Each structure stands twice: as structure tokens, then as C-alpha cells.
Image (spheres, grey):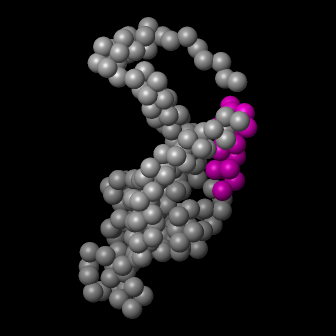
Amino acid sequence: MIEVPELTTTERRAAQWLEAHGASLVDFWASYNAISAGQILYSGFGEALRPLGLSYESWRILWVLALVRRSEPRLLAQTLWLSRPAVTSALNRLEEGGHIVRTRATNDRRLVSVEMTEAGAELLERGATVYISTLSTLMDALDDEEKQLLARIGRKFWTLNFDRTRKSAGTPVRVGAAVIGTAVASA
């Protein structure tokens, strides 16, 4: 079991402030620590993937494109819980590196399809070893029981947002093969 350090002065003051405002300390610390853990994981993956020229967002986009073959920026944003500007920025970098291609629909210039190139698939494969190694390293701090508990808690949060996730993952790409036009520079 993980030993929990004693609260710092700032943490004790935060607890007093929260109690004075009627907040549940258990709810606060659970959410605060979950967010902190997410930030630690996010930073760890980002640092590990950076030498390959990938941000964690870019890695996730390539991974999803490997699973679904083609998508749209709006669907990638919804599926990955990223802002549209974050997706656009990541797509710009991936396109500049030749890892994805964006194609604009000829029937509606607002619609853009995104596909991974062969170079993108190769980058994803090179990143797989780094990603899996980092995942193992970051999760080594937990024993099997803690990992199972974290997986159940994370799944519960995901389930709370199931409708939105299901909708975004199940929405077909609006750019059909018959209407695909020319490659574009940005979404």
C-alpha cells in the first residue's frame, strides 16, 4: 500500500477553506489527486515522445487514425477529449512532417478528412515501444490491486460521459469518397 505523506501547511489551509465553504474534503482530494495524476501521466508521455518529434496529442491522433483509418478534426477532438485548436495544431505538425494528409470535400469546403500516411504509420510504430515502456514505468508505482482500482474508477468516469463518447466515436465521417477533393493545409 502507498504511504500517504502528512499534509503540508498549504494543504491544511486548503482543507480549512473547503470546510468553511461546505465542500466535501473527500470529494475535493479525490478530484484534485485524480487531476494531478493525469497531469503527471500526460507530462511523462509527452517527455518520452518528444525525442520522436511527437506531442502526446499527436501520438493519440495517430493511434486513433490507425484504429479508424479516416476521421475528421471535430471527431478527433470529441473522441480524444481535446480542444479543436489543440487538434488543429497537432494536425498541422503531423501534416508538415508528412505523417497525415488532410483532404477537403468538394461538396462542402468546411469538411475535412484526415488520414495517416505510411510515414505516419512508421512513426506510430517507432513510438509504440516508447509509449509502452513509459506506460509501464509510470504505472510501476502501483501494485496490481491499485491498478485494478484505478482502472475501475477511470472506467466509471468514462461511463459517466458514455453518451458523448459513443456519439463522437460512432459518428460517420461526413467526407465521403465520392466528394473528396484536394489536400488542404489546415482544418
Identify which residue is drawn at 56% across, 62% down. 63
Residue 152 locus on image (x, y percent): 60, 44
Q: Quadrant of residue 173?
A: bottom left
Residue, far top:
9
Identify which residue is drawn at 40% across, 23% down. 24
Residue 142: say if magenta.
yes
Q: Which of these two is toward me, 38 or 155?
A: 155
Residue, far right:
144
Residue 177 locus on image (x, y percent): 42, 88
User: How many numbered marks does the figure carry?
Assistant: 0
Identify which residue is drawn at 31% across, 20% down. 22
Identify which residue is drawn at 42% across, 52% down. 161
Q: Quadrant of the C terminus?
A: bottom left
Q: Which of these two is toward me, 150 or 88?
A: 150
Q: Quadrant of residue 164?
A: bottom left
In the displayed structure image, the side of residue 92 where residue 51 appears, left or right:
right
Residue extent of the magenta highlight: 128-144
Q: Is residue 1 above or below residue 84?
A: above
Q: What predominant SS class does the magenta segment belong to?
A: helix
Residue 23 locus on image (x, y percent): 35, 22
Q: Which of these two is toward me, 114 or 24?
A: 24
Q: Quadrant of the N terminus?
A: top right
